[in-house]
Structures are given as structure tokens and as C-alpha cells.
Image (tube, rainbow, N blue to C red):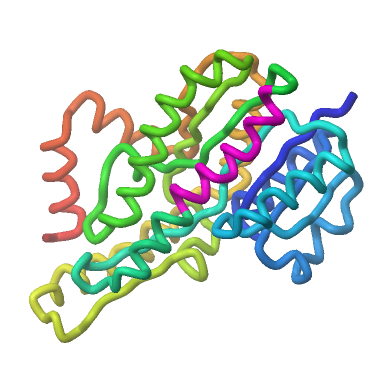
């Protein structure tokens, strides 16, 4: 019997590449996105269900899971991929955009996971794969909101693994580095109030360097392959890094410590 994977945020980037890879590997794929009517590639693939899901809409979460179960009968793996990054001085962000960042990256992840766990518990098996970031273990300037959500994903995942083991499930975390997706486009929310002139220097320096980081980023299919490894290796490993930069930053933060990362950031961004 084919295994089935349920993925959020499949309209582009990591989500789309993951859906394509698992389909090529012989899996059933439930590829969810906010606007499925705009999708033209995944809808042409066999054993792929493209359906609507907005992590901010509880009804759409339940509907997508029910449609997936109706078509394929069972879901084996959940990949919580939907999310975006809010960057800029905290003072510049209105409260509603702060809430949107945490509701999307954290509360939405929790809502989708919670809705799926009843199915996993019934089957006494299942796997939750949460897409975090190297930004869930270290930070860059102006990313207090984004990094706050990814640090939350790390903590949620670490703790959740203990309880879902009681129902035969596993939790895994994927920690990509910089990935060449449209994260710097529609998935990147930069906000800055130029009237708050005290932040002008740091904003200018960060916005100058960030495009260079993305220019040398790894491709999204690198992350997709790491997700496939996590889903199929049969190991109890919690964390999987994706991209050479993620591995480098993990090494530096682990062995050289927080103060070194701060010093490195200041030199890198010329702060």
C-alpha cells in the first residue's frame, strides 16, 4: 500500500519541490495551498491531490484532511511547511502584522498538527515533520519576529516528540539554511518606518547584505531530499540540517558559542 504525505504551503519553493519528490518516489501526496486554482504543475501529476488550506482557517484545515483521507484512506506523514518571514525593526511593525507572523508560523502549525494527531492516534503511527530554519537556533539582525517563531517551532517540536511517542508517532525538525525560493519575494515581509531614523543605518546595512545571502543559497530540492530522508530513514533523529551554510552555522554556534555568533554577525553586516 502506498504511503501518503500531507504538505502545507505547496504553491512554491520547498513545499512544491517536496510534493514533486515524494510523488516521484511513489507516494500519494496531499499538496495544500491557499490558492489551488492557480496551481498548474502539481495538478497534472498522478497520485497527487491539490487542495485548499490556509493555516489561519480552522475549517480549511479540517476540510483538507478529510478530503485527503477520502481520496487515499490514510495519512502517514505531515509536513508543516507553510510560513513566511517578517523582518524589520520591531517598533515599525503594527500589532496585527506581529500577530499574523506568529499565527502563521506557530499557531497555524499547532492547529494543523493538532487536527492530524487524532488520525495518527487512531492508527497508532504517523510522523510530524516541522520545517524550522537555522534561524531557529541562531539569529540575524532585524529578525526578532521571524526568529521568535522559529525558536518556538524548535521548542514545540522537542517537547511534542515525548507525548506523541505514546501514540506510536515521531516528530522531526528540518533546519534549512538560505534557500533559493521566493522567500525573499512574496514570503518575505519587510517593514520599516523611515520616520524612525535611528534605525536607518542598520536597515540599510541589512537590506544590502541579505540579497547576497539569497544569491548563493541552496536550491529548494536540497531541502526536499532532506525531508525525504527524515521521513524514510527509520531513525529517531530529531534534527536534520539542509544546506552547507546551515551545517556551518550549526557547528559554529555549537562549538564556539553565542558570543562568537554575535561578533560574526556584526562583522558580516558591518554593524
Q: Is residue 245 visible?
A: no
Left/right placement of residue 122 relative to residue 189 reads right
**Percent coordinates x, y for residue 184 in the rendering:** 45, 65
**Percent coordinates x, y for residue 136 in the rendering:** 35, 41
Q: Is residue 172 above or below residue 56?
A: above
Q: Is residue 196 above or below residue 52?
A: below
Q: Quadrant of residue 257?
A: top left
Q: Which residue is drawn at 70% across and 17% down?
A: 124
Q: What stretch is highlighted in magenta?
A: 105-121
Q: Does the magenta stretch include residue 109?
A: yes
Q: Does the magenta stretch include residue 79?
A: no
Which quarter of the figure is the N terminus placed in? top right
**Percent coordinates x, y for residue 231 in the rendering:** 65, 27
Closest to the observer: 123 or 37?
A: 123
Tell me which secondary structure the magenta stretch mostly adopts: helix
Which quarter of the figure is the C terminus placed in? bottom left
Question: Which residue reaches farthest left?
Answer: 198
Amino acid at each position: 500500500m502506498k504511503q501518503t504525505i500531507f504538505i502545507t504551503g505547496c504553491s512554491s519553493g520547498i513545499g512544491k519541490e517536496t510534493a514533486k519528490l515524494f510523488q516521484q518516489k511513489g507516494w500519494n501526496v496531499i499538496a495544500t495551498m491557499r490558492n489551488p486554482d492557480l496551481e498548474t504543475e502539481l495538478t497534472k501529476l498522478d497520485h497527487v491531490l491539490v487542495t485548499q488550506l490556509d493555516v489561519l482557517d480552522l475549517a480549511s484545515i479540517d476540510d483538507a484532511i478529510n478530503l485527503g483521507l477520502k481520496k487515499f484512506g490514510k495519512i502517514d506523514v505531515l509536513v508543516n511547511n507553510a510560513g513566511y518571514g517578517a523582518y524589520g525593526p520591531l517598533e515599525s511593525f503594527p500589532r496585527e502584522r506581529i500577530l499574523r507572523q506568529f499565527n502563521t508560523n506557530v499557531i497555524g502549525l499547532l492547529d494543523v498538527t493538532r487536527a492530524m494527531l487524532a488520525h495518527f492516534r487512531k492508527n497508532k503511527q504517523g510522523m510530524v515533520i516541522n520545517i524550522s530554519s537555522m534561524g531557529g537556533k541562531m539569529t540575524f539582525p532585524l529578525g526578532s519576529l521571524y526568529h521568535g517563531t522559529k525558536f518556538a517551532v524548535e521548542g514545540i517540536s522537542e517537547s511534542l516528540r515525548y507525548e506523541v511517542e505514546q501514540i506510536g508517532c515521531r516528530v522531526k525538525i528540518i533546519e534549512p539554511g538560505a534557500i533559493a525560493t521566493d522567500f525573499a519575494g512574496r514570503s518575505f515581509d519587510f517593514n520599516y518606518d523611515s520616520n524612525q531614523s535611528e534605525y536607518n543605518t542598520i536597515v540599510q546595512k541589512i537590506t544590502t547584505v541579505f540579497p547576497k545571502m539569497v544569491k548563493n543559497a541552496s536550491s529548494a530540492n536540497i531541502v526536499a531530499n532532506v525531508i525525504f530522508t527524515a521521513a524514510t530513514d527509520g531513525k529517531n533523529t530529531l534534527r536534520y540540517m539542509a544546506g552547507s551554510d546551515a551545517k556551518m552555522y550549526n557547528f559554529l554556534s555549537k562549538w564556539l558559542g553565542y558570543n562568537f555568533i554575535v561578533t560574526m554577525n556584526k562583522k558580516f553586516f558591518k554593524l
